[in-house]
Image (spheres, rainbow, N blue to C red):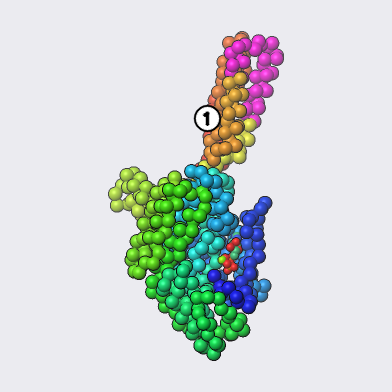
Amino acid sequence: MPPAAVTTSAWRWFGSNTPKGNALTEPFIKRFDDRYTQSREYQFLDVLNQLHAAVPAVFSNDTQLGQIRMAHAGVTLHEWLLALPAAATGQSQALNALHQALSVSRSVARMDVWHFDLAFRNFMVEQTNALASPSVRLIDFSLAISSRFPVQKPLWMRPDAMQQHPALHAAITEDWRQFFRRNQLSEPPSYDGEFDIPMTAYRADWCNDLAVDRITQRWCVIAHSLGLLLIQSTQFSCLSAEMRMQVDARGRSLMHLATESQAELALEDSLQWLSSQFSAPTPRPRAQVTQAAQAPAQSVLKTPRDISTSNNAPPPAPMLSRIRLLMSVVLIGLGYVLTDALYTAHHLHVTAYTAVVVLVTLALSAILLVSMLFSEHRGRLVNRLSQAQGLALLALALEIWTQRVPGAWPAGIAVLGVILLMLRLEVKQGQRAL
Ligand SMILES: Nc1ncnc2c1ncn2[C@@H]1O[C@H](COP(=O)(O)OP(=O)(O)O)[C@@H](O)[C@H]1O
Ligand SMILES: [Mg+2]
C-alpha cells in the first residue's frame, strides 16, 4: 500500500478486472510510470516463470512504452470470493482457493521471492466454469524482495503497525527515515500516518543496503500477512459461521510469530488443515501411498511419473476423439436408415417389441443428453449415448431377422450395432485419435 497522499502515483494499470467475452484470452497489460518499478516487476515475473511458479506467464517487457504484457489471470480473489454462493460448494471452493493462495505464497518464498503485499487484490483466480476447480495466481511484485535483486529505493509502502509484522514495520520505517535524512527533507511527525513523498527526490534516490533487504524474519512476515488474509476471509458469506471461527483461529495462529521455524511450521499446519477442509484430495501423501503400494521398493520416487504426482500434477483428462465421434454418428445414421428401409421394403409390422426398443432408446438418449448439460464427464456420456444406439440396433436386427428378411440385412445392422458398442470415443491426451 503506497503512502496515501503521494503527489504522483508510481503505478497505473490498464485492462479489465472482470473479464468478459474473450477477455481471458487477451493478454493483460500492466503500465508503469518508472523504469525501476517496471524492471523489478519484470525480473520477478521472469524468474518465477522459469521456475514454473503460479504467476501469470509474461509475454513481453516494453521499456519504451512502459508496459509488461502478461497472461490474463482472471479476477481478484476478493471479487471471486464475493461471487461465491453461501452453500457447501461455495465454501469448499473458497477453502480450495485460500489453500492455493497460501501455497503459492510459500512456493515463491521458497524460491527466494518474499512478497510483502499478500492481499486479496494480488491473488488472481481463473475458473472455467462454476464446478471446475479454481486456479490461483500471485501478481504484483512491486513490494517483493529477493537476494537476487537487492532493493535500491525504499519500498513504496506506508508503515502500518496494525497490519504489518513488527519486523517489516520496523524496516520500512527505518528506510523512509533514512530517505528523508539522505535527501535533507523535513521528516514527518509520524511515519505511521499519512505523509508526502516528493517524487523528484524519490526518483533520483538510489541507495544500497536497505533495511527491508536485511529483514531476517522473512517467514514470520509472510505468515503474518497470510494470517491477516485468512482472518479477512471470514467476512465472505460463502463460509458458514462455524467455518469462519475455525478460519479465524487459523489466521491468528499465523500472526506475530517470532522465529522462522515457528512461522514455517504454522504455515505448514494451516496448509494441511485447509486442504483437509475441501473435497479435493491432498495430493502428495495419497499419491505416494498409491505408488508405494504398486511400484517395487527402491524405485518409488525415482520415476518421472512419481515426480509429477508428487508435484500435484493431475492426470490428463481423457478427451473425445473427433474421428471416432464422426464415425459413430455415421454408423448410427446408417443403421437407422437401413432399418427404416427394410421395414418399408418388406412391409414389416411395428410390433410392441419394436415400439418398446425405440421408446426406451429415446428416453435413455434424452436422459444422457440432459445429463451432459450438468456433468463434467461429457465424454463418458457421449460414449454411453453411442453404446445405447448400438444396443438398439442389435435389438432391431433381432426383430428384423425373425421376420423372414434375408439374413445378410439384419446381420449388417447387427455388425453396425456391435461396432458402436465397442467404439471408445474417449482417448487419453497425447494418444492418437484412432
Ligand atoms: N495478469 C493479470 N490478469 C488480470 N488482471 C490483472 C493482472 N495483473 C493485474 N491485474 C489487475 O490489475 C490490478 C492491479 O495490478 P497490480 O499488479 O496489483 O498493480 P498495483 O501495483 O497497481 O497494485 C489487480 O488488482 C488486478 O485487478
Ligand atoms: Mg496490487
For the residue marked with disc 1, what is the amino acid?
Met
Within the displayed image, which quadrant is ligand 1 positioned in? bottom right
At 49% from the left edge and 51% from the top edge, which residue is drawn? 94
Q: On the picture, is 52 further left or further right than 261?
A: right
**Picture quadrant where residue 109 is located:** bottom left
Quarter of the figure that contains the C terminus: top right
**In front of the other: 82 or 36:** 82
Q: Position of residue 247 (x, y in %)?
A: 43, 54
Looking at the image, which is closer to me, 337 or 65?
65
- Residue extending farthest front: 189
Marker count (numbered)? 1
Instruction: Name which residue lies at 67% across and 72% down.
Output: 65
Q: Secondary structure at mark 1?
A: helix
Along the horizontal axis of the image, is 123 left or right of 242? right
Residue annotated with mark 1? 422
Asked if residue 278 shows in the view, the reply is: yes
Locate residue 238, reporting x and y percent.
51, 49
Residue 320 versus residue 345 in the image, above or below: below
User: Which residues, given as a range, are shown in magenta?
Assistant: 330-358
Q: Is residue 215 above or below residue 432?
A: below
Question: In what quadrant of the picture does the N terminus appear?
Answer: bottom right
| 173 drawn magenta | no
Residue 41 locus on image (x, y percent): 55, 70
Q: Quadrant of residue 78?
A: bottom right
For the question of whether residue 110 can be seen, the reply is: no
- Taking the spot 50% from the left edge, 75% from the top edge, the residue there is 192
